[in-house]
Image (cartoon, rainbow, N blue to C red):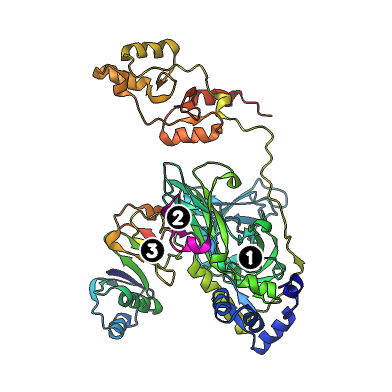
Amino acid sequence: MGGKEQSRRIRSVKEINEKIKRGDAVVLTAEEMIDLVESSGLEVAAKEVDVVTTGTFGAMCSSGAFLNFGHANPPIKMVRCWLNDVPVYKGLAAVDGYLGAAAMSETRGFEYGGGHVIEDLLSGKEVELRGESYGTDCYPRRHVETTITLDDLNQAVLVNPRNCYQTYDAATNSSDRVLYTYMGTLLPNYGNVTFSGAGQLNPLCKDRYYETIGVGTRIFLGGGVGYIIGEGTQHSPQGGFGTLMVKGDMKQMSSRYLRGASFYNYGTTLYVGIGIPIPIINMRVAETASLRDEDIYVKIRDYGAPLRPDLRPVVRKVSYAELRSGKVTINGRDVPSSPLSSYKMALEIAEVLKKWILEGEFFLTEPVEPLPKYREVKPMKLRRRELTVQDVMRRDVVTASPEDDIKTVAKKLVERGVDHLPVVDKDSRLLGIVTSWDLAKAIAQGSERLEEIMTRRVITAYGDESVDVVVRRMAQHNISGVPVVDRFKRVVGILTTDDVSRRLVGRPTG
Amino acid sequence: MRLRLIYSPKVVEKPILATVILKTGVPLNILEAKVNAQRGELVVSIPAKGEKLQRVISLFQDSGVEVQLLTETLQIDLEKCISCGACISPCPTGALRFRPDWTIDFVEEKCVTCKVCVKACPVKAISIP
């Protein structure tokens, strides 16, 4: 089918709305559309179906709400504000604030954050408000403490700068320890794969070329009615990473579709439910609206490498169908896979939106402006090259050989004033490590040869690794130094916490 | 399987338990009961498995009763659970999996109480008694 044929108008949004008003619009969920295309073919489905409803329910950290608390008497210009100990952004007028989903409680940390406050407000719970100010002639009050509910607020408007990723790369972990990430728990040695996104139900996959979705599109948001107000941050549709900025009146929403959540050792977030109706205006939209999980591919990235998201090594490409099957093949081995976003809730949202339209409560809109179809995502521009291990490490490493006698080694440590002694073979390849503490213990216990006491499983670093990454590694293993090795395991230097702190103190601040 | 049933003030006076027994024919056994005018909490044991057990659970939920699965190993709070699946692939023994309707199924025999799922759950729906 040629491009012209594909874009030939089948029906307009206006015609669809007239049918909704009359009660004879044909509305299918994306799953039902897929079934219809499989049984009757695309031509028939496109002719019969007016609207395909979509849904997604996943963790969306770039979410939050603008709140207006109303004025106290005497009034206060709050410069700092907390709800249930979660800081609210106060760079706005006296009693306006923005509560971000990823803001964490100052008393409960990872357990409770902005997302949970939003859920609590929606469940009708009372929330503790605390505000501070310096006092002005017009706003003399300096402190306020009270409890509020959603009803007490003048406005509570959900405004989410980045929601509804079209697709999202899946995650695995090649390293030798468990990682707790925003992609959930990743077991060592490619122990599992996690993924996010509703795949064949995802709104942006179903209008792949952004022909019907744009600024002003009316949507299901958190159980109420919301609108698309623009492209989301990091919108990059050409590679399958389109995103949306959305808003809606929180007072219409429900805690069933906006859930506070926390990812262990990562932080807090908000699960957001979004559903978008796709009007079947031409064959191209009909075609993308019937894409299946089998047709939608993402990359599996290795979170074992502590790198910028787009630089994390790609393990392989995979379809949502394979991800959703519960196992994925990596290096010839079956690895369990599971989602972080809820397919069950995504389906429910597509069903609810369908019901709204069939009952004549929800009408479709034409976009006021289209969304960009191409956007580059740039990395953060860094002023200085990242400090790497080879910038800070010491190259004159004192080493020992496994046959060395313990007393000689102890003497060497004292003379050279070092605490860490890599043990190497005759080609300088790393065999183990001993510390001054190990030596003291060995002398006390009467051990004689270094081989008997050295640690063989050594935590190491490479010269080109970022110092921050290696400092975190040392903290995690509760050690104060690492030998620096090349790709042949030859010791080329040593990095200790002392070296790092000396360097940091001396680092120019300007 | 043992269940904890939590009755809110709205439903505390309705004969829900009896209705479930009559509808399913499953002879539920009450192990613990704390009931007053505001709230009721029952622990019951259910001699049923698979679909029959699922039907008992659904009947309670449809009547407005909050249902918690009580197991020796771990408890899944079905009111909190959003059926995301974040607990499934981290489970080293395959004790957690999806049912065909994309809700979470817990296979107690396989569980070794390693608690990986407790940390993995983003909505704190899983706990160890």
Task: Look at discs 3 and 2 and give the one toward the viewer.
Answer: 2
Q: Is residue A474 above or below residue B98?
A: above
Q: Residue A353, image x and y in percent?
A: 59, 76
Q: Looking at the rendering, in which quadrant would you find the C terminus of chain A?
A: top right
In the depicted view, which residue is nearer to us: A103 or A439? A439
In the picture of the structure, the residue carrying the numbered disc 3 is B97
Q: Is residue A471 above or below residue A79?
A: above
Residue at point 65%, 51% (across, down): A90
In the picture of the structure, the residue carrying the numbered disc 2 is A329
Q: Residues within 10 Å of mark 1 (few under 14, many from 20)?
A: many
User: Is residue B10 visible from the viewing direction of this image?
Assistant: no
- Is residue B33 found left or right of A218 in the rendered image? left
Q: Amino acid at mark 3?
A: Arg
Task: Look at discs 2 and 1 and give the one toward the viewer.
Answer: 2
Q: Amino acid at mark 1?
A: Leu
In the picture of the structure, the residue carrying the numbered disc 1 is A204
Q: Secondary structure at mark 3?
A: strand
